[in-house]
Amino acid sequence: MQAVILAAGQSSRFVPFTTFSHKSMVKIMGKSILEHTLISLQKGGIDHVVIVVGENSDISKKVGDGKTYGLKITYVTHIGAKGMGAALLDAEKYLDKSFFVLNAYHLEFDIFAKHLLKQQITDDTVVLLAQKPLSSNQFGVMEINGEKVVGIEEKPKKVLDNHLQIIGIYLLNKNFLEILKLTPLEHYHFEKALDTYAKKYSVSYYKTKENALSLKYAWDLLTIKNYIMQKLKSHISKNAEIGKNVSITGEVYVDENAKIMEGAVLKGPVYIGKNAIVGNYAILRNNVDIEEGVVVGARMELKNSLLLSGVTTHSGFLGDSIVGCNTKIAAYVCSANARLDREAVTTIVKEEKVSSGLRHLGVIIGEKVNVGIRVSTMPGVIIGNESIIGPSTNVMKNIAPKTKYYTRFSEIIETT
C-alpha cells in the first residue's frame, strides 16, 4: 500500500519555531516527528511513501531513502505554496490507483489504517477519517447521511447534528485526482474537490473515538510528545554515567554518553538525549524530554517540558514549557504555567488571541535566546528567536524575535 505525506506547508502559526524547513522536523525522543510518522506508516502496512516537500527543504537529506524504516521514499518538490490540492497533484505520476494522504505529524496512522482498510478497496473507493466535531470555526466537517458522506464544508458557521469533523487522514484514488484537476485552484481547492466527489460518487467514513493529533501551534508539541512517551521503555545506555543517590522511578530512557549527577530525581516518563547532562539534585518529572546536548543545571525542576538540542539551564522551574535549540537560561528562572482562574491558557499568534485548550501551559522560547538571572514568565508567553531577556524581568507578553526586553529599575540609595 502507498501513502502521500504532505510536508510543504509554511507553518506560519508555528511560532517561534520558524527556522525548521518543516514543523515535523522538530525532534522528540531523538527522532523528528516525521520519522515517528514513517515508523507508524510501516506498522500500518505501507511500503511506499511519497513525501511532498517545499522549496529548499532539507527533509530528504535528513530522512534519506526510507530503508532505515523499511520503506521506499520518493520525494516531490512543491513550488509556490499553492495548497494541499496542488501539492497532491504534484505527486500524481508516482501514485497507484489507491493511496493514503496524511500530514507529516500523523504518527498515530497505524491505529487508524486498519479501520480505513476494512472495506473492499476498488478504483472508486474514498474513505475519510472522522470524529465528533470539536469546533465549528477551526476545522473542516463532513455532512453524513447514514454510512455515506454527502458533502464537505470547511469551517462552517454552524455545526449540525449530521456533521463530523475531518481529521486529515484520507484513503483516495486516481479518479479523485481527475476531479481535483477540474476544480478551480483556490485556498480550499482540495476540500471543494472532495465535496464534488462526494456528490458524484460514493464516499464513506470511519468515526473514531481516539483523539487525533494536530500540529498547528507550537504548544501542540506537548501533546505529541506525551503521545510518543506513552510507549517509552526504560533503558540506560552502557556508556551513560549515573551518579550516587540518583532516584529513578517509572519509565526513564538515558541515551549514549549522558550524565546524571548525584542526587538527581527522575520520575518517568523521562527521556534524556545523547550527551545531555542532568545536574545535582535536579528534578525531571511527568513527561520531560531533553534532547541531545541539553544541560539541566543543579536543583533545576522540569515538569512536562521539551528542551530541544543544545539548551542550557541553571536552577529554577520550567513547567509545561518548550525551549528551542541552543537557548541559554540563567539561574532562578520561573515559568508560571496556569491561570489564577484555572481556565484554558490563551496566547497571541499572528496578532490574534488564541486559546491553547490547555489548562497548563508555561513559556514557549525560540532558538538562540539568552534569558538572564531571576526571569519569570506568565502562562502562554512566546519569546521569539535570538531575543535577550534581561535580569529580574517578568515577561508578561509575547516577545518578537531579536528583541532586547528587560525591566528598567530605578536605583535608590538612602543614607542615615
Image (cartoon, grey):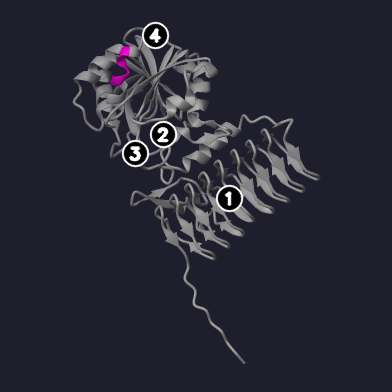
Mark 2 or mark 1: which is in front?
2
- Could you tell which of marks 3 and 2 lies nearer the N-terminus? 2
Where does label 2 land, which residue? 22
Q: Position of residue 129 (x, y in %)?
A: 41, 24
* Nearer mark to the viewer, of 3 and 2: 2
| Mark 1 Cα shell of 10 Å, populated few (<14), some (14-19), many (≥20) | many
The structure residue drawn at horizontal position 39% and vertical position 34%, both measured from the top left corner, is 133
Q: Residues within 10 Å of mark 3 (few under 14, many from 20)?
A: some
Residue 319 - label: 1
Question: Are there few (<14), some (14-19), or many (20+) residues within 10 Å of tag 4?
Answer: some
Of circles 4 and 1, the one toward us is 1
The C terminus: image quadrant: bottom right
Q: Which residue is mark 4?
A: 121
The structure residue drawn at horizontal position 71% and vertical position 37%, both measured from the top left corner, is 250
Q: Closest to the observer: 216 or 415? A: 415
Disc number placed over residue 87 in the picture, else none = none
Q: Residue drawn 41% across and 7% down?
A: 120
- Disc 1 or disc 3, which is closer to the eye? 1
Instruction: Tell me: residue 408, above or below residue 404.
Output: below
Where is residue 305? Give x, y as percent. Answer: 57, 45
Earlier sequence position, callout 1 versus callout 3: 3
**Amino acid at dot 2:** His
Magenta span includes 12: no
Three-letter amino acid code of the residue under disc 1: Gly
Task: Identify residue for label 3.
Answer: 136
- Judge by depth and name the residue closer to the eye, 245 or 116: 245
